[in-house]
Image (cartoon, rainbow, N blue to C red):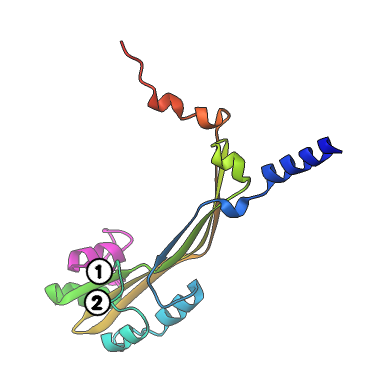
Amino acid sequence: MKLISSVMVAAGLLTGCSGMLPQAKLDINNPWQDFDAAKASFDQIVPFQTAMPQVRKLGFDPAKTPNVQTLNQAQVISAALPSPLQGRANLPEGIMACMKAGDGCVGYLLEPSRITQQRVGNFFLDFLNFQRDTLTTGWKFSALLVVINDTVVYKQWNGQAHIESTDQHSNPLGPLQSMGETVKVLP
C-alpha cells in the first residue's frame, strides 16, 4: 500500500506544478485589446480628410504612444513603396504629395501589440532543464501614417491577427547539458 502511495505522489509531482513555470508578457501600451479593434480604429482614418487631432482620438498618438518611429521624407518613401523602380505614374497620391512637400512630410510608424509567452509542460522537466516548452500567443498591428500640414495623406497597415507558436527545447543531459559551456579546459 505504501508503494502505491509513493508511486502516486511521484507521478503527481512529475506531471503537475505547471502553474509554477515562468511567464512573460510583452504589452506595448496601447488602447486596443485585440487586432480587430486596432484595425477598426485605423480604418476610420481617411487620407486627405483626417487631421491629427482625430488620429490622436483614435489611439494613434505619436506624442503619447510608446515606441513610435518618426520617419523623414526619404524613409516614408522607402517604407511605402515596394520597389524603387516603380514609376511615378503608379505612385499613390499621398506619396506623390509627400515627395512634393519635402521636409513638410513626416511619417509615423506605430506598432501596437499584445504578446504573451508562457512556459508549459512539466515543471520538473523544465526546472531541471530536460525539456522547456514556451507557448507564445497574441497579436501585432503595424500602421504607417504619412502626414503633411497636420493631415494624414497616406496610410498603410500590416500585422498578425493571431499569433500562436510553441518553442521547444530538449536537453537529454538536463542540468549537465549547459555545464560544458561553463567548464574551461586548461592547456
The answer to whether residue 31 is left or right of residue 154 is right
Q: Quadrant of the C terminus?
A: top left
Q: Is residue 80 magenta?
A: yes
Considering only order in the chain, which callout, 2 or 1, is on the residue closer to the N terminus? Answer: 2
Asked whether 95 or 152 is in front, the reply is 152
The answer to whether residue 120 is left or right of residue 59 is right
Classify mark 1: helix, strand or loop.
helix
The percent position of residue 45, horizontal first and vertical second, equals 36, 83
Q: Is residue 135 above or below residue 144?
A: above
Label 1 Cα neighbours within 10 Å, binned few <14 / some 14-19 / many ≥20: few
Give the residue number, with chain letter if any, for mark 2.
63
What type is the residue that disc 2 sits on?
Ala
Mark nearer the viewer, 1 or 2: 2
Give the residue number, with chain letter if any, for mark 1.
88
The percent position of residue 13, horizontal first and vertical second, equals 68, 44
The percent position of residue 89, horizontal first and vertical second, equals 28, 71
Q: Is residue 101 above or below residue 181?
A: below
Magenta stretch, residue numbers: 68-91
Q: Can you see residue 51? A: no
Classify mark 2: helix, strand or loop.
loop
**Picture quadrant of residue 130:** top right
Residue at 39% from the left image edge and 74% from the top image edge: 30
Q: Is residue 42 magenta?
A: no
Asked whether 185 or 93 is in front, the reply is 185
**Picture quadrant of residue 39:** bottom left
Residue at 49% from the left image edge and 60% from the top image edge: 116
The percent position of residue 111, horizontal first and vertical second, equals 36, 67
